[in-house]
Image (spheres, rainbow, N blue to C red):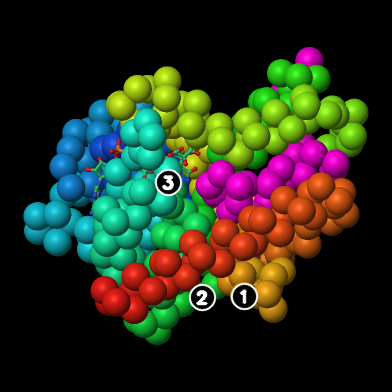
Amino acid sequence: MFSKVARRTFSSSVPSAYKVAVLGANGGIGQPLSLLLKLNTKVTDLALYDLRGAPGVAADCSHIPTNSTVKGYSPENDGLASALKNADVVVIPAGVPRKPGMTRDDLFNTNASIVRDLAKAVAANAPSAKVCIISNPVNSTVPIVAEILKSAGVYDPKKLFGVTTLDILRASRFISEIAGTNPAHEVVNVVGGHSGVTIVPLLSQTQHNLAIKGETRDALIHRIQFGGDEVVQAKDGAGSATLSMAQAGARFAGAILNGLAGEKDVIEASFVDSPLFKSEGVEFFSSNVTLGPEGVAKIHALGELSNAEEALVKVAKETLVDNIAKGVNFVKQNP
Ligand SMILES: NC(=O)C1=CN([C@@H]2O[C@H](COP(=O)(O)OP(=O)(O)OC[C@H]3O[C@@H](n4cnc5c(N)ncnc54)[C@H](O)[C@@H]3O)[C@@H](O)[C@H]2O)C=CC1
Ligand SMILES: O=C([O-])CC(=O)C(=O)O
């Protein structure tokens, strides 16, 4: 009797039921991201995969009394395929992080093949999932995944996302430190890509418009562009942002789930296959995206830019063309 009542109450409180797979779940990002996804009530099946350690992370998370079941998978016994089967959303933070002195591009040689191989598994086992790429360099890893999905004949540009949400989090926080405001109320559009000069915060569109000016403004833009370096330096060889990234990844995956569930006006920035600058050869670009049941419902234009922002976007586009080509060429040479 008691269990029947309990079960009824339980299921009526579940708004939607989705399977989310995290690939790289035992890592610095993977562990706290798995925790935060365990707290999302739209997730009913949480599949945690890593080369090692995922069953431990899963057992740990599974004791938290939210509605999802959690299972850990290893490469043995086709664990990757099982983790991916029927996944609605796949989040990929697998790969090595930076050490001081490295750029994100320095991670390419190691992470490109990791992401390529995981993308092949996604194509084979979860071809219609929404795929969220965290592994760096995002500007190149997203095109790698696109190429693999294309060769498998399952590419849908509406379903592939580079996660740039951490740039938005940092921009809100750093602006609030200057303006003395609540960071939760700082809405800021950050566009372009996810590395250095490709990260373009559109400060003219914030509530401060041009009120933050001169050297303060330049320093703020630089801090948003190179915020990742602050964490890499502070961690002093032990990796890069993990906790703030987990929060960013959980927010982004949560938005994807909200879109899947048919909620209205779900908007997050993401590095996607975008029409905005395709005519200039920039195949992927990050801007605000409305998310819906199919993934991308609408890609928003950048809106009005100041002259200085136009110049920043120009530089971002030039770098992005190279970063994207590097990913595409990698797959051509190493299919
Ligand atoms: N998009 C973004 O804003 C951010 C991206 N990152 C990137 O995220 C990635 C992960 O960072 P951390 O979690 O700090 O690194 P980490 O080294 O702590 O964790 C990476 C995990 O990936 C796993 N892994 C490696 N190869 C794998 C494979 N083939 N299949 C499954 N799992 C595999 C490792 O076993 C490890 O558990 C890095 O590339 C980092 O640069 C980091 C912060 C922000
Ligand atoms: O800086 C890094 O290497 C990790 C990252 O992408 C970030 O923190 O934005």
Compared with 115, 44 (above or below) is above
Does the beta carbon of the residue at mark 3 sit less than 8 Å from ligand 2? Answer: yes
Quarter holding the C terminus is bottom left
Compared with 264, 224 (above or below) is above
> Residue 321 appears in which quarter of the rendering?
bottom right
Toward the top, the furthest residue is 180
Instruction: Give percent across and percent down for residue 43.
Output: 45, 46
Find the magenta span and give its range: 180-205
Quarter holding the N terminus is top left
The label shown at residue 281 is 1
Question: Is residue 136 found left or right of 199 in the rendered image?
Answer: left
Whether the residues at callouts 2 and 3 have beta carbons within 8 Å, the answer is no
Q: Considering the numbered disc 3 on the image, is that residue within a helix, a strand or a loop?
A: helix
Instruction: Give percent across and percent down for residue 259.
Output: 62, 56
The local crowd at label 1, few if under 14, some if 14 to 19, many if 20 or more residues have their Cα within 10 Å, is few
Whether residue 105 is visible here, answered yes or no, is yes
**Residue 310 vs residue 143, the one in the foreground:** 310
Instruction: Give percent across and percent down for residue 302.
Output: 78, 57
Please name the amino acid that badge 3 sits on. Arg
Whether the residues at callouts 2 and 1 have beta carbons within 8 Å, the answer is no
The label shown at residue 265 is none
Instruction: Give percent across and percent down for residue 256.
Output: 56, 53
Point 34% across, 70% down: residue: 330
The CA span between labels 1 and 3 is 22 Å
Please name the amino acid that badge 2 sits on. Asp
Question: Is residue 16 found left or right of 86 in the rendered image?
Answer: right
Please name the amino acid that badge 1 sits on. Gly
The CA span between labels 2 and 1 is 19 Å
Which of the marked residues, 2 or 1, is nearer the chain's N terminus? Answer: 2
Does the beta carbon of the residue at mark 2 sit less than 8 Å from ligand 1? Answer: no
